[in-house]
Image: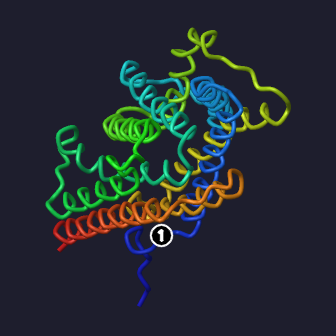
């Protein structure tokens, strides 16, 4: 008897795991670069603008725009613009947060995004969560409270920026889900980078601060490359494995963030941050597990 081939629900390809793992490393270096450039006096809006300008140029090259009209074809340009600004907002607020918070703190708060997406997907997409996933959302919120500790003199402006970055990212994901059925993948990648570059260009004279020295220029220009390749690796990973199957491996970025925070900035998260991060990650993993159970149940009902 021929042995059945494993499905994406039961076996995640090693190549997909490696792609997600590598993307997390690139994103961690990107955040480290943003924190370093902010510490030497470069403004967060300028850092974010350059990051997306390089990303847009890289997208044109990787997507071979000169031979692929799908890169420029859109069904709704206003929605592309709004989605691009959501992504820019996520990056911009994250860079602001990194000026005062440790890398581990910002990524811990960012990991609450899957729970927020679960909560708002109901009214915005009609994808209502059951009570088990709502309980996971509440548990994740407890984890955020543990990390930020409002009322104990710890919660500050950096935490507000980190929460704004997380919420902006959630809206970016929701808009991506809404548009993915009508827009090409190439256009979604390209216009998400081009939109902030075009819209924010007129304001550059008000906040542009030029780097000093080769190191700062290298770090600044490399951020667009790191972000662009990181997003490209994620897309490649999702082509060979399901989002649910890969979701747990994204949390490994916390290891990179803690390691780079200690290596570059001599930062180590305190026990509150570690405990809150573990609560948030555990909640997110339960949501992933629950969604996988529902997928398998639906598949069994449709193929008795």
Q: In terms of depth relative to the viewer, which is nearer, 114 or 106?
A: 106
Instruction: Label 1: state its secondary structure.
Output: loop
Q: In terms of depth relative to the viewer, which is nearer, 132 or 110?
A: 110
Q: How crowded is mark 1: few (under 14 residues within 10 Å), some or many (20 or more)?
A: some
- Identify the residue at image location x=21%, y=37%: 124
Looking at the image, residue 291 sits to the left or right of residue 266; the answer is left
Percent of width and height locating residue 96: 53, 33
Q: In terms of depth relative to the viewer, which is nearer, 132 or 192?
A: 132
Percent of width and height locating residue 286: 31, 67
- Identify the residue at image location x=35%, y=61%: 284
Q: Quadrant of residue 261?
A: bottom right
Q: In terms of depth relative to the viewer, which is nearer, 13 or 116?
A: 116
- Identify the residue at image location x=54%, y=16%: 200
Instruction: Identify the residue under disc 1.
Output: 12
Percent of width and height locating residue 254: 53, 60
- Identify the residue at image location x=68%, y=40%: 36
The coloring applied to the image is: rainbow
**Count of numbered circles in the view:** 1
Which quarter of the image is occupied by the C terminus?
bottom left
Percent of width and height locating residue 246: 45, 62
Residue at the far bottom: name it: 1
Q: Quadrant of residue 98?
A: top right
Residue at the far right: name it: 214
Q: Measured along the vertical axis of the image, is residue 9 above or below residue 114?
A: below
Which quarter of the image is occupied by the N terminus?
bottom left
Residue at the far left: name it: 131
Looking at the image, residue 190 sits to the left or right of residue 261; the answer is left
Looking at the image, residue 90 sits to the left or right of residue 290; the answer is right
Q: Quadrant of residue 139?
A: bottom left
Q: Measured along the vertical axis of the image, is residue 94 above or below residue 85?
A: below
């Amino acid at each position: 008897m021929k042995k059945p081939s494993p499905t994406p629900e039961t076996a995640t390809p090693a190549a997909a795991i490696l792609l997600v793992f590598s993307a997390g490393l690139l994103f961690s270096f990107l955040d480290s670069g943003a924190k370093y450039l902010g510490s030497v006096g470069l403004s967060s809006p300028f850092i974010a603008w350059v990051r997306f300008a390089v990303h847009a140029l890289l997208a044109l090259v990787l997507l071979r725009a000169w031979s692929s009209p799908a890169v420029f074809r859109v069904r709704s340009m206003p929605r592309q613009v709004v989605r691009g600004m959501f992504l820019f907002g996520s990056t911009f607020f994250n860079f602001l947060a990194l000026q005062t918070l440790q890398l581990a703190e910002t990524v811990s708060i960012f990991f609450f995004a899957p729970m927020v997406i679960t909560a708002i997907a109901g009214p915005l997409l009609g994808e209502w969560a059951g009570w088990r996933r709502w309980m996971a959302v509440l548990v994740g919120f407890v984890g955020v409270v543990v990390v930020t500790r409002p009322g104990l003199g710890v919660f500050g402006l950096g935490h507000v920026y980190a929460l704004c970055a997380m919420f902006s990212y959630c809206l970016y994901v929701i808009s991506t889900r809404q548009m993915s059925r009508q827009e090409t993948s190439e256009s979604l990648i390209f216009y998400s980078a081009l939109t902030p570059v075009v819209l924010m260009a007129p304001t550059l004279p008000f906040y542009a601060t030029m780097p000093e020295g080769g190191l700062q220029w290298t770090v600044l220009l490399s951020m667009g490359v790191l972000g662009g390749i990181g997003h490209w690796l994620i897309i490649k990973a999702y082509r060979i494995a399901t989002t649910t199957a890969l979701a747990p491996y994204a949390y490994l970025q916390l290891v990179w963030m803690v390691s780079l925070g200690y290596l570059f900035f001599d930062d180590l998260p305190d026990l509150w941050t570690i405990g809150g991060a573990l609560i948030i990650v555990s909640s997110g993993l339960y949501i992933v597990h629950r969604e996988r159970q529902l997928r398998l149940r639906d598949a069994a009902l449709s193929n008795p």
